[in-house]
Image (cartoon, grey):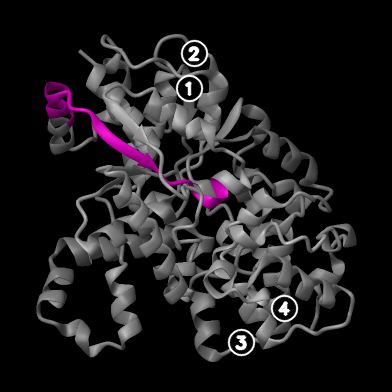
Amino acid sequence: MSQSFLKGLDYSVVQQCMHCGLCLPTCPTYDATKLERNSPRGRIALMRSIADGQLDATRAFADEMYFCLGCLACMTACPAGVNYAELFENARAEAEASGVLRSPKRNLIRNLTLKWLFMDLNRLQLAGRLLRLYQQLGLEALVRRLGLLRLLPKRLQELEAMTPRILPEFSADLIAPLTPAVGHKRYRVVLLTGCVQDLIFSDINRDTVEVLSRNHCEVVTPQDQLCCGSLHAHNGEYELARQLARQQLDRIPPGQFDAIITNAGGCGSHLKHYHTLLGDDPIYRERAAIWDRKIKDIHEWLGEIGIEPVQSGSQNGQFDKVSDKVEDKVKDKVKDKVKEEVDEVVTYHESCHLTHGQKITRQPRDILRAIPNLKLVELPESAWCCGSAGIYNIVQPEMANQLLERKLKHIQSTGATTVATGNPGCLLQLINGAAAKGMNLKVVHPITLLAEAYRCSAP
């Protein structure tokens, strides 16, 4: 093995775990199996054995690291402040560097996705356009209606059912490069539109810009953006994550903005640790430190600057650059909501990396409570993982489906017709899960609900 990530890690991080076991009840995989090796404590013991040179990275070790969701609930529970996020990423990097998981099929998939597709947004958008064409031409519906999917292996049939709907327009089509603040300009911010978010939830990016503008922010939205690198860091491609971080810092100089805004919980957790990634880089470490201070989740930022109240007489006309591309049916739906003025019962599912990675729990609820005609009902086990966890629902479908089923039962118990969550992976997981069960459930980002409320209050 050319490099040992765990042996090269600061040993104080490796040995910090006291093995007290307070993390055990918070770990979804341990809760399901009651096996010590499937717990944070058990996994850290394996990592420490490798760091101490007592154990080599084996197939069993690598499989265990990928059985972990990386939800970071153990970090919230840990009284010793163990940095499991850093351990987790280095452990997966160790697994990849060891080569114990390599196979022609796995190598091909990782080369096509992590090392090619997600390294260039233009490639990802091309794939998105092809998928959109396949859906819009009716080919997807035809293939399903004719039962052709039955010819595929069972696992491929399951993956096909999870295929997201590609929106008619990407973020650059919906959002101007510069959106002025409504009223008095107080801040200048830049929005990160993401990669998966850009393909399947570009409307959330549009809503985010509208909300920021209405809260006195001039918003810069670069047209040619990059993947943040979280997908790579969480899947053992440490050097690719570093490469993407450097490219981000080159394209978006952090010192030019009051805040760098992200609206994806998983991405935001990674984006706040560029200095950890590049701390040994003499060229980028200072910029990375500034970047980490400027990165703000959208809920966090609105909590800091204060939310403009939703009221009649909003200056809607100043936001035409974003809102003029909203489809007519969306506009009609908004008008109908104004007329009906019916309370909407909403519950809130917490993105793991938003609550455990970024410690942001109060602000999304504050936003939801600030919306008129909306009733927030607390979700049992709101901070329990839904099973999405990046690509976990693809590589560990059995455990992911167990967690999804548990989450949907809790959502049903609230009586809510809408569930809000602040991460694209969670959104897609809940949308697919609700559709599979035939649930009449609206799944939205909290910022979308706030943006709708601002539009509804306009004269």
Helix, strand or loop at mark 4: helix
Going 48% across and 22% down the picture, which residue do you hit?
A: 218
> What residue span does the magenta drawing correspond to?
334-354
Residue 355 in the image, given as x and y percentages of width and height = 56, 44
Residue 383 in the image, given as x and y percentages of width and height = 51, 49
Helix, strand or loop at mark 2: loop
Q: Residues within 10 Å of mark 2 (few under 14, many from 20)?
A: some
Which residue, given by chain and number where applicable, does mark 3 sit on? 102
- Residue 97's disc is 4
State how far apart marks 2 and 3 are (Cα).
53 Å
Circle nearer the N terminus (4, 1): 4
- Whether 230 is drawn above or below 448: the answer is below
* Foreground pick, 50 / 297: 50
- Whether 51 is drawn above or below 420: the answer is below
Evaluate if marks 1 and 2 touch, with contact meaning CB atoms under 8 Å apart: yes
State how far apart marks 3 and 4 are (Cα).
10 Å
- Residue 185's disc is 2
Give the label, 3 or 1, closer to the camera: 3
Q: Residues within 10 Å of mark 3 (few under 14, many from 20)?
A: some
> Mark 2: which amino acid?
Lys
Circle nearer the N terminus (2, 3): 3
Circle nearer the N terminus (3, 4): 4
